[in-house]
Image (tube, rainbow, N blue to C red):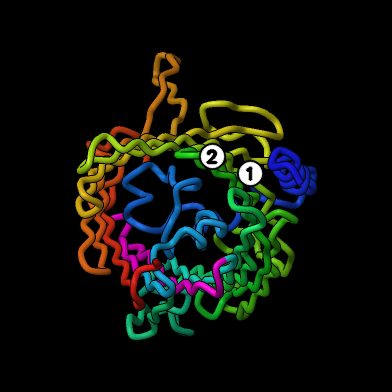
Amino acid sequence: MKVHVIIIYLFLLSSFAFSQTNAPKYSNEFLNIGVGARALGMGNSVVASSDDVTAGYWNPTGLLNTNTDLQLGLMHSEYFAGIAKYDFAGLTKTIDTASAFGISFIRFGVDNIPNTTELIDAQGNLDYDRITFFSATDMAFLFSYARKLKPNLSVGGNVKIIHRKVGDFAKAWGFGIDASVEYTKKSWRFAAVARDVTSTFNAWNYTLSDEVIEVFTLTDNEIPENGLELTLPRLILAASKKWDINANFTFLSELNAAVTTDGKRNVLVVGDPFSIDPSLGLELGFKNIVFARGGISNTQRVTNITDKVTYSIQPNIGIGLRFKGVALDYALTDIGDASVALYSNVFSLRFNLSPPKK
């Protein structure tokens, strides 16, 4: 099967359910933040060049490109002045010369949220001892598999299990599938990833006490009902190229384009139902030990008080260090608060748990 036929097939699958009307625009958005400081430093433009344990998230096919048979990855970052915590852990294992699998865990959560719905007792008095605390967490488990079909053509996929919980008030279980294909030609890599290829669902269940329902009613809030939430597909197209400058230096560049299917978004190319959000990543390496990275992403239209339209971008930088099977990466996203996104410091680690591949 030709590579362009596979890409067209993935695109058709990814647009299969775009006409669903009960799908919110930003469902399961925590799965679009990204994992790994290397990727975040490059503006999330690593879909084609993924070659480590984080490929289970970015492009499952990239698990075939790891330089070791067994690798562990960890990441931690914080958002909104430390209120929200975002964590990743992954493990990948080579099965044989033509296949590999991986397991990834992602958690995005806000902990210690005060619950004041029972702050006032039956006599109408304020009782601060009645305040309790809860967490709002989004979690996902990704089970990845990749297989090489030809020397320059590989395919892969993810099975995703999602669990979302808001204290004792609400919880949801979800299921989804990703599919990917990668084609290499000399120093070029081309990739296509169809996320939520058949639409991902979350089945929500709410447990609300009479007191909570009363608070919702008195504050004129809508009382939530059990239901199904759909995440519509998105297709990511990517191309990367690596240059060997000399015996010591290498340079890699990658361009990604994320095609969403849930209607108009505030991105560079706006359409209905398809919108396109491009991103660019660069990486300069020295002796495959030290790396400097940069990237541009999150292009948005901004209208000021005079109705003048300008564009904002999110610049990112990062550095990396590899030594004897250990890789430490750091990224600073949204330098100088140049976009509407908030900047964040991100650290990640990778450990080779087995000798390098021959």
- The residue under the point 33% across, 52% down is 38
The mark that comes first in sequence, 2 or 1, is 2
Q: Please rate how many residues cluster around mark 2, counting C-alpha atoms within 10 Å: few if below 14, some from 14 to 19, many from 20.
A: few
Residue placed most toward the observer, 217 or 259: 259
Q: Residue furthest front?
A: 358
From the viewer's perspective, tell me whether residue 51 is left or right of residue 212.
left
Magenta span of residues? 74-97
The quarter of the picture where the C terminus appears is: bottom left
Place of residue 354 in the rendered image (x, y in percent of width and height, measured from the top left): 36, 77
- Real-space CA distance between mark 2 and mark 1, rounded to the nearest whole angstrom: 22 Å
Place of residue 45 in the rendered image (x, y in percent of width and height, measured from the top left): 43, 42
- 305 is within the stretch colored magenta: no
From the viewer's perspective, tell me whether residue 81 is left or right of residue 141.
left
- 78 is within the stretch colored magenta: yes
Vertical placement of 164 versus 265: above or below? below
- The residue under the point 59% across, 58% down is 221
Place of residue 72 in the rendered image (x, y in percent of width and height, measured from the top left): 38, 73
Q: Amino acid at mark 2?
A: Lys
Looking at the rendered structure, the secondary structure element under dot 1 is strand
Residue placed most toward the observer, 228 or 332: 332
- Give the overall secondary structure of the magenta segment: strand
Vertical placement of 273 versus 192: above or below? above
Judging by the rendered image, the residue that carries numbered circle 1 is 235
> Can residue 154 be seen in the rendering of this structure?
yes
Judging by the rendered image, the residue that carries numbered circle 2 is 185
- The residue under the point 60% across, 67% down is 145
Q: Nearer the viewer, mark 2 or mark 1?
A: 2
Q: Amino acid at mark 1?
A: Leu
- The residue under the point 69% across, 42% down is 3
From the viewer's perspective, tell me whether residue 52 is left or right of residue 141.
left
